Image (cartoon, grey):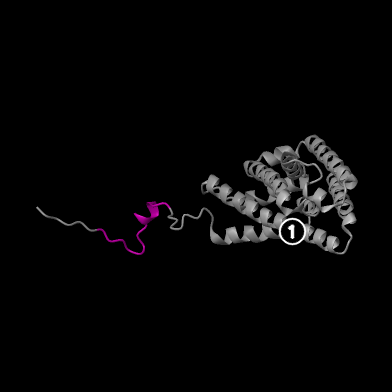
Amino acid sequence: MNQSCSYEIGDNDPGLIGSLPPISYSGFPMDTPTFLAFVFTYSLVAFSPGLCMTLSMTLGISIGVRRALWMMVGELAGIVVVGVCAIGGVAALMLATPGLFTVLKFAAAAYLLWSALRTWRASATIAMTTRGVGLSERQLMAQGFVTATSNPKGWIFDASLLPPFINPDQAILPQAVMLLTVIVIIEFICLLIYASGGRALMELLTRRGLDHWLNHISASMMVGVAVWLILF
């Protein structure tokens, strides 16, 4: 016996369609308007002059863009840690313990002041600035990581910005990975821009015979970052 079975669904028949989960043909973990809104919002904040960007410009002046990349690695790692904690709700706990932030802030400020003193005393020759006045790659990464994780404003910003862009009705992990990937890309671009600006300033001063001001400018900016950490 040969029978054919067919099932036609009318426009108002919710039986089969209503039972199916929503299908994402693109595999994109976030809806486009929400994603674009996040990119726009975070780009505005990231590109504005701040603690991390000032440090990037400072190192661009004193050690150049290539060596400043080591600081950026530590900085981006710290930003990811803060972002993960914000999405996981740990940021709220951290913000409730201001004593921990006080310790981190003063430790980071002390390290920056120590680096500023070494930079101020260093020779202003190009050979010395390209060596990074004695800072190793590990020290540069630590400097970036501590700066990124010891700034309470970064925790407050991520804790207030990231959770609203997470849709609890969808898988959390793909959304978190998407947001953190965007953050790292935007931050890296901004850090490169600021470091390149610092390097351009160094080359301008060198051409005009004012290279003896380079380390003094760099050291002064480091002091400014340290004061920023302590006061704000």
Q: Secondary structure at mark 1?
A: helix
Residue 226 lies, in percent from the top left, at 85, 45
Q: Is residue 148 left or right of residue 1?
A: right
Q: Of 195 and 121, which appears nearest the observer?
A: 121
Asked if residue 223 is among those painted magenta in the image, a careful observer would answer no
Residue 188 lies, in percent from the top left, at 67, 53
Residue 40 lies, in percent from the top left, at 65, 61
Q: Of 89 and 9, which appears nearest the observer?
A: 89
Using a 10 Å C-alpha cutoff, classify the residue at mark 1 as few (fewer than 14 neighbours), some (14 to 19) or many (20 or more): many
Q: Where does label 1 land, which residue?
A: 196
Q: State the residue at coordinates (79%, 57%).
A: 198
Asked if residue 16 is among those painted magenta in the image, a careful observer would answer yes
Magenta part of the chain? 7-21
Q: State the residue at coordinates (80%, 61%).
A: 203
Task: From this view, report whether residue 37 is shown above or below residue 138.
Answer: below
Q: What is the three-letter code of the residue carrying label 1?
A: Ser
Q: How many marks?
A: 1
Q: Is residue 82 left or right of residue 98?
A: left
Rendered image quadrant of residue 50: bottom right
Residue 32 lies, in percent from the top left, at 55, 61
Q: Of 229 and 91, which appears nearest the observer?
A: 229
Q: Is residue 219 left or right of residue 137?
A: right
| Residue 149 in sight | yes
Task: From this view, report whether residue 61 is shown above or below residue 107.
Answer: below
| Residue 167 in sight | no
Q: Of 60 and 167, which appears nearest the observer?
A: 60
The kind of secondary structure the magenta stretch mainly shows is loop
